[in-house]
Amino acid sequence: MRAPLMPLRDVVVFPQMVAPLFVGRDRSVAALEYAMEHGKAIFLSTQRDARVDEPSEGDIYRVGTLSTVLQLLRLPDGTVKALIEGKERARVREYLPNPDFFMVELEVLDQRFPTDLESEALMRSVAATFDQYAKLNKKIPKEVLLSVGAIGDPGTMADSIVGHLPLKLEDKQGLLELLEPNQRLSRLFELLRAEIEILQIERRIKGRVKRQMEKTQREYYLNEQMRAIQKEMGEKDDLKSEVRDLEEKLNKMRMPREARQKVEGELKKLKMMSPMSAEATVVRNYVDWLMALPWRQRTRDKLDIAEAQIILDEDHYGLEKPKERILEFLAVQSLTKKIKGPILCFVGPPGVGKTSLARSIARAMGRNFIRVSLGGVRDEAEIRGHRRTYIGALPGKIIQSMRRAGSINPVFCLDEVDKMSTDFRGDPSAALLEVLDPEQNFSFNDHYLDVDYNLSEVMFITTANTLYSIPAPLQDRMEIIRLPGYTELEKLGIAKQFLLPKQAKANGLAHEQVLLSDNAILEIARRYTREAGVRNLERELASVCRKVAKNLVKRGNPTGQVRVAKSGVETYLGVPKFRYGRPEEEDHVGLANGLAWTEVGGEVLTTEAVVMPGKGKLIITGKLGEVMQESAQAALSYVRSRGKALGLPEDFYLKVDLHIHVPEGAIPKDGPSAGITLATALVSALTRIPVKADLAMTGEITLRGRVLPIGGLREKVLAAHRAHISKVLIPKDNQKDIKEIPQRVLKAVELVPVEHMDHVLAQALAVEDPAAIFSERPVPYVIPTADKSEKSSDLMAH
């Protein structure tokens, strides 16, 4: 059979289907006109790709529907509307030559198949499923359901139903090409079930959307009512204006992208909130903190080294090493224009000016200054802040201080960094590791802000009295600069230049009204204070100024002038608090002057030793620590090993008890540097040779009598100088530390390096001929071999 072929786009026509078609392509219109003139038969087949305007034979499916043109109507725009009715399935056998349209030779496909029980069951299942589908899809009219229910042929039922389903083109073509009715119904049943599931999901989604819309509309209605109420009360307008002000401020600020996005997101949330809600307060505080921080603001450094030197010298006397380090930083900054802030740690006794030096550095550099005291801090959140989930959360002290500073490059003083402690809440010193590491602090993340903040331009200065309580990793991140105690002459200069004018002004006096002689100031420093710094000296000068002010007011002459000489100090300050000079003026047996280092500077430590009849017992008193007690035992072992050379009987230690005492027993004392002092006191007590009173010593002793190096030499020599001691014995290995001692002190105190205990005794004992101390050559101590009872008594003597 021959018939014209009209290719269809996005449409599959089935037998028994009546469908209107709008035709615009010339070849298709020509095919329709030919069909109307020659029996109205036309073959309809679907294109594989609807986007092809001029399809070829390969672009058209081979199986289609032989149809009849019921009606043809030409429209004003040139297109044609055709009403088509499908008749039966057919397959293209071959394409016949025709220049105007496709002409094909067709093979009508036989659709006569016997009906069995399976067909009946499939028909019932498909009809029921289609009924369920129609209930979900309201677009299918009831008449279609009635007509489908009346169909008795399985093939006809399948072709009737498929036209009402929104199936894919490939699925419809597949059904058209299935000739066996049972197969067609089975496939149609599967597609119906899939469509039903899709419709059910769509219905659930629509239900959710509808409920959400109802909820949203309800909230909108309630919010509108609330806005109206708030407008009457004047509340919402305040919030709107506040948000508007914050947005304007944000547009003018220079912030990193991450921080800006955070603020914008929080402001969006704030707009949607009620001003009375607790969350609105939290968001507002968070935005305030982010916008109050100095993200880009910085002060310009003063890079004039000469001016910086003048400012540092104006504020502080001495302290050459830290001043030199600051000038080095300024010099490098002027050359490179960009340098990470240094991390300095000033270590020294109280009152030497560590914190005030940090303030002076900020003034010299033209930077803002902030100070945070870490004494007693034991919570890690004090440094890093609390997370916003906690009620009343705030940033840590670092971020709080940066807000106060108002610039991104201040001088930041972390005071008393050695006084932090640790408990179950965390270790604040560990949190400081990131803050004080130049390789990490450019992205410091506070728990509250949860945004990286740049601390790399901050100049951190930490202060401490001791290093041993600072964890090693934290020490490793800092440049340690030691600030030792002041000499008497330095204290005199500080008092005249700084302390006295300051206290005179604080007490309502002019500097010229209080005139203290140099000897008066030295008298106060010597007899009314005992410290490495000048804090107590300032208090005593303040006391003098107050009493001068009282006397002037009493006399009725507030502008008068008062001179205070050395002899008049006691009138103003009362009885001297401390004894000045050497601990002992005369040489004594069993009494040696040692030197000790403390957190407040050096001290002269008198050591006493006495010999009593007994059974070889060593008594140690004076609240000495374990290390110092072991030094005493080592000293005794040395003396016993040198007993014969010192002219002592071989069994001297079996018949006597030795008592070593270090006065000021309420003060704990420890350390190995008193070893040679203990040994000297023991030798003096046993040989009855006095120790020189104008001599002091420091050094660790070994069993062989070697003198090992010690620490804190500068502070110890300064203490000896304050006590008018003229000679100090020091370990030979400490000669490298002599250059740290001021020249004025070296002129007044003779330092004698020693490397063996024999040399110490030769220098310390008051004899005309030091060689006479040792009557025989040294003999090593050998454990005697004897019977059981002798061994027992010897071990008891040990």
Image (tube, helix red, strand yellow):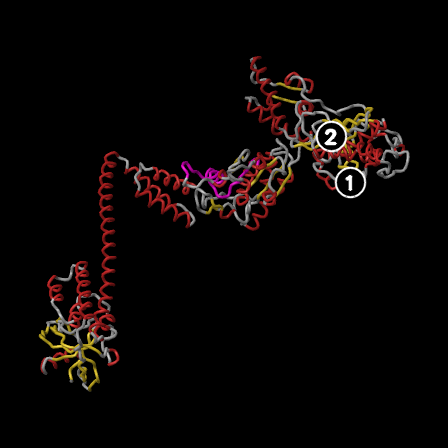
User: In front: mark 2 or mark 1?
Assistant: 1
Q: Where 31 falls versus 692 (above or below)?
A: below
Image quadrant containing the N terminus: bottom left
**How far is disc 2 from disc 1 in space, using C-alphas?**
20 Å
* Between discs 2 and 1, the one toward the N terminus: 2
Q: Quadrant of residue 550?
A: top right
Between residue 466 and residue 548, name the one nearer to us: 466
Whether pointer 2 and pointer 1 mark residues with C-beta atoms closer than 8 Å, the reply is: no
Residue 13 seen in the figure: no
Mark 1 neighbour class, 10 Å CA radius: few under 14, some 14 to 19, many 20 or more: some
Res. 413 mark: none
Residue tagged 2: 721
583 left or right of 78? right
Between residue 465 and residue 590, name the one nearer to us: 590
Residue 372 seen in the figure: yes
Q: Residue 534, percent across and down?
A: 63, 29
Q: Quadrant of residue 354?
A: top right
Q: Residue 698, percent across and down?
A: 75, 34
276 left or right of 85? right
Residue furthest toward the top?
A: 555
Residue at 21% in and 75% down: 180
Image quadrant containing the C terminus: top right
Magenta-colored stretch includes residue 369: no
Label 2: state its secondary structure: helix
Q: Quadrant of residue 97?
A: bottom left
Residue tagged 1: 732
Residue furthest toward the bottom?
A: 97
First to last magenta residue range: 390-416
Q: Amino acid at mark 1?
A: Lys
Q: How many marks?
A: 2
Between residue 190 and residue 373, name the one nearer to us: 190
